[in-house]
Image (spheres, grey):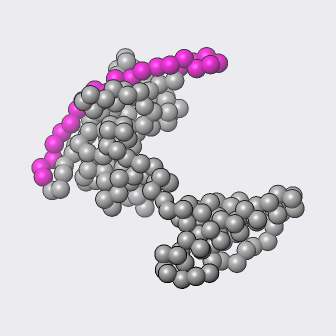
């Protein structure tokens, strides 16, 4: 794996900090046809940080990559991951990975590199970043999403902007009220962490 090590950059046990393979995306891109050879890479700030190849066969694919841990020698890995399918309600098939970790075998859409092999988030005990948020962080994130909808500058300490052109006043007032509620929740939480009273 192109120097990314164990995939736990920053030491956080969150899915967002691991390299991942999403079978739904590979299916949309048409990569799951038997005989297909996939080259996939991850990048950060425009720089490639890791890469993997996969050879697709009927009912499975082989993951092929190099791995090293904490400066050890590079190890070439090539192992199969079984594929499962389920029928879609309106026709067609949906593909799933079968987690290759020992004693797992879960049917999952995403595999993560949280160690030497790609496995499901349950095997690596990975949480979603939002599950690690404090209530005030969550409120600030939600306020930020509303600021994006309103085309306001990000950050709850910035002044509010104008109503976006074409937005109904009723919608605008509803969103600004929700924004203000989230911003206040976040500020109260920050103040409590700092031992201040609002």
Is residue 109 visible in the rendered image? The answer is yes
**Which stretch appears magenta?**
72-93
Image quadrant containing the C terminus: bottom right
| Residue depicted at x 58% and y 82% | 197
Magenta span includes 119: no
Q: Residue furthest left?
A: 73
Instruction: Give coordinates of residue 1: x percent, y percent.
Output: 26, 47
Q: Nearer the viewer, residue 180 or 193?
A: 193
Magenta span includes 91: yes
Instruction: Give coordinates of residue 80: x percent, y percent.
Output: 28, 26
Instruction: Give coordinates of residue 137: x percent, y percent.
Output: 53, 64
Using the image, determine if residue 22 lies above or below residue 131: above
| Residue depicted at x 25% and y 52% | 5
Using the image, determine if residue 177 lies above or below residue 120: below
| Residue depicted at x 54% and y 17% | 87
Main SS category, magenta section: strand
Is residue 41 visible in the rendered image? The answer is no
Left or right of 93, for residue 143: right
Q: Nearer the viewer, residue 23 or 147?
A: 147
Using the image, determine if residue 10 lies above or below residue 54: below
Q: Nearer the viewer, residue 1 or 11?
A: 11
Using the image, determine if residue 165 lies above or below residue 184: above
Left or right of 171, for residue 155: left
């Amino acid at each position: 794996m192109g120097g990314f090590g164990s995939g736990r950059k920053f030491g956080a046990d969150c899915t967002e900090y691991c390299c991942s393979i999403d079978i739904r995306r590979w299916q949309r891109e048409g990569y799951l046809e038997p005989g297909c050879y996939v080259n996939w890479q991850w990048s950060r700030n425009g720089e490639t940080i890791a890469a993997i190849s996969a050879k697709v066969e009927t009912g499975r694919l082989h993951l092929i990559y190099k791995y090293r841990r904490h400066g050890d020698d590079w190890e070439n890995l090539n192992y199969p991951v079984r594929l499962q399918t389920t029928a879609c309600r309106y026709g067609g098939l949906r593909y799933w990975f079968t987690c290759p970790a020992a004693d797992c075998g879960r049917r999952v859409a995403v595999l993560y590199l949280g160690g030497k092999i790609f496995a499901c988030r349950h095997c690596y005990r990975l949480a979603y970043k939002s599950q690690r948020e404090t209530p005030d962080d969550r409120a600030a994130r939600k306020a930020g999403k509303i600021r994006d909808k309103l085309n306001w500058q990000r950050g709850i300490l910035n002044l509010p902007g104008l109503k976006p052109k074409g937005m109904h006043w009723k919608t605008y007032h509803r969103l600004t009220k929700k924004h203000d509620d989230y911003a206040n929740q976040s500020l109260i939480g920050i103040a409590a962490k700092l031992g201040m009273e609002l």
